[in-house]
Amino acid sequence: MKIEKALRSAFTPPEPRNKDKFIDSMRYPKLSYSEFILSQVCYIRKRVWLFSAAVLLVAIGAVYVIPQNEMYIVWVVSALIPFLALMTATEISRSDIFGMSEIEAGCRYSLPQLIGARMIILGVCNFAVISAIVVIFGFFSPLGIMKAALYILTPYMTVNGISLFVLDKVTGLEGVYISVAATIGVSLAGIFIFGKISFDMRFVNALCTMLCAGGVIMTAIQIEKIMSGRNERYGINN
């Protein structure tokens, strides 16, 4: 016992003195979280910004090309909107696809924080694009702003929820392929079912409301899992 105590006292490191002061004196780049978020803009691929601009230009051009009394144009544009959600989902999954998750998880700003920063940037961009389209359709089509918002947000939030859920459960490119298939399915449903087949508009409105609400809830759940570190791919499973 004496030998054990002697060894323990000999090899036990002393308590560090002025540790916090020493760390604060070290020279390394110091970023606030807002500066960190802005720095991530440069790491988002240019194709994402180009596609967002293209969707907005299609919506603006459609107002002048297709007659205003045609509902079909709304579903054509809303069929493009889900791809904004897909681009966001694939963009935040790049770390996992290219095998960088473990490295980025050990950085000063961890992987959940990095994913959160990119989601904020892309979410603000998508919100701006969707808001502009809703305003355009609200003023230049007989739908009005409320219905235009419902019809455009429904496919977007549906794909958002599905893609984030799939990418949480399925790793690698397989998850991306499933998300792409889901996005195409939602887009085709909007064009060929709602755009060409006559339904009672009360049924359409009720269906869109339920799908949109479901997408919002599923998206919120997945975002909470990512930011809390409980996401199976971007965080630490508790």
Image (cartoon, rainbow, N blue to C red):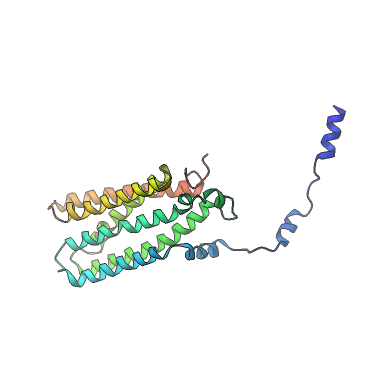
Q: Residue at x 25, y 54 (%)?
A: 187
Nearer to the camera, 92 or 36: 92
Whether residue 183 sits left or right of residue 69 in the image: it is right
Residue 217 placed where, x, y %?
36, 47
Q: Quadrant of residue 174?
A: top left
Whether residue 72 sits left or right of residue 152 in the image: it is left
Residue 233 placed where, x, y %?
47, 45
Nearer to the camera, 88 or 15: 88
Nearer to the camera, 158 or 102: 102
Looking at the rendered image, the quarter that the N terminus falls into is top right
Q: Residue pushed farthest top?
A: 1
67 over 122 or under it: above or below: below
Q: Residue at x 75, y 54 (%)?
A: 19
Residue 89 placed where, x, y %?
39, 53
Whether residue 66 sits left or right of residue 86 in the image: it is left
Whether residue 130 sits left or right of residue 234 in the image: it is left
Q: Quadrant of residue 4?
A: top right
Q: Residue pushed farthest left?
A: 198
173 over 71 or under it: above or below: above
